[in-house]
Amino acid sequence: MQYLDYILKDKKYLPQEIEFYVDSKNKKEHLSFIDVKSLRKLYNKEVEIPDSNGFMLNGEKKINIIGTLLCDFLNCDFSDLDSIHKFVRKYSPVLLSGISNVDIPIDCTEKSLDELLIKMGNQIIDFKQKFMEDVNYIYYFDKEDMSDMTPIQRFYVLMNTTHSKIILRAFNGDKISLKTEQNIISMLRSRSISEEEVIETARSDKNIQIIPCRFASDDLTQILILELRELVYMDNVTIKKCQNCGKYFVPEKRADELYCNNEYEDTGRTCKDIGFFKYKQKVVKNDEVARLYRNTYQQKLLRVRRNPDNEEYREDFELFRNEYKKIKHKVASGEMSRDEFKEWILRRK
């Protein structure tokens, strides 16, 4: 607490500075900021609450998969206080403070913080929507003459175009400071090591790492743009939309993952746990042809199970299933229209 007492001395508002650096080797992002702890409505109940009406202040550090902060920001509904609470529980209100130009008093209480969060949310909504459009342009834009372009190429296009609504053009180097681990650098400079010794160390240590550059800014906009830049330059790392809940996420293991690790609709289970099953349910519910096929399939299967000795029913079911495998590819490739697919199902009922 001595360090925090020092940086908060004579201050009326919480410092907004966010420090950010990327561990490229492990594809992790490191964030440091002043966190606001911990009234029961906003924060975990198991956290000890002080005797005063204010908050406990802590220097908070977060280490996540690269892109986590950006995805959490894009997934937050800034028109909904509960959604904002979820974001600041994971991070801190100070992340939203700089981007919305709303200061948070050091003696802020739960009630006054809620009022500030609502004010922040209203000012951030438009910004988030525009940033989302940039991300979609880089990863999902399906304009025909750009279909062969990589995320890096699309990022380059956005950074060098004149469209006024593009958030990436809000990048401002004057709002970013570069920090280094001064204690490590001083230690290295103070050591008397010959060039030969350094060469030998470099050759023998296969895990040798360069001291990372740490960026700092009071403006979350700059941190998010830096984060997106790091993402597009990394191999086999991408931002995807969960096929179950529609939220943005960065796949942890495979680039072709379809479902995120977010909890799905307060079920206590993640989209990854139940994603494919729920996705199929959605498809069947919203697609007349898919629903017709599913109902026909279930009817034929049920008939076989109720009549296990009836070879005719079993052969009909197997023929239907095998024909569908071939027809599915024809529909996907455009050889067969969905109307023709529907007619086939009706004939085979």
Image (cartoon, helix red, strand yellow):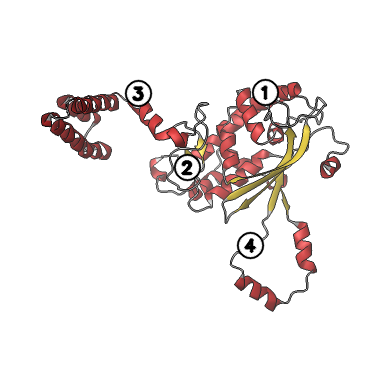
Name the residue carrying label 1: 118
| Dots 4, 3 in contact, CB < 8 A | no
Q: Residue 124, relative to residue 252: is it above or below?
A: above
In percent of width and height, residue 257 lies at 44, 43
Q: Is residue 50 visible?
A: yes
Name the residue carrying label 3: 285
What is the C-alpha distance between the residues marked 4 and 3?
52 Å
In percent of width and height, residue 140 lies at 45, 40
Local secondary structure at mark 4: loop
Numbered badge on residue 218: none
What is the C-alpha distance between the residues marked 2 and 1?
30 Å
Question: Which residue is the extreme one toward the bottom?
Answer: 196
Say whether residue 243 is left or right of residue 316.
right
| Dots 3, 2 in contact, CB < 8 A | no
Quadrant of the image containing the N terminus: top right
Name the residue carrying label 2: 139
What is the C-alpha distance between the residues marked 4 and 1?
43 Å
Say whether residue 134 is left or right of residue 255.
right
In percent of width and height, residue 179 lies at 73, 53
What is the C-alpha distance between the residues marked 2 and 4?
30 Å
Sequence order check, earlier mark of 4 and 1 = 1
Numbered badge on residue 209: 4
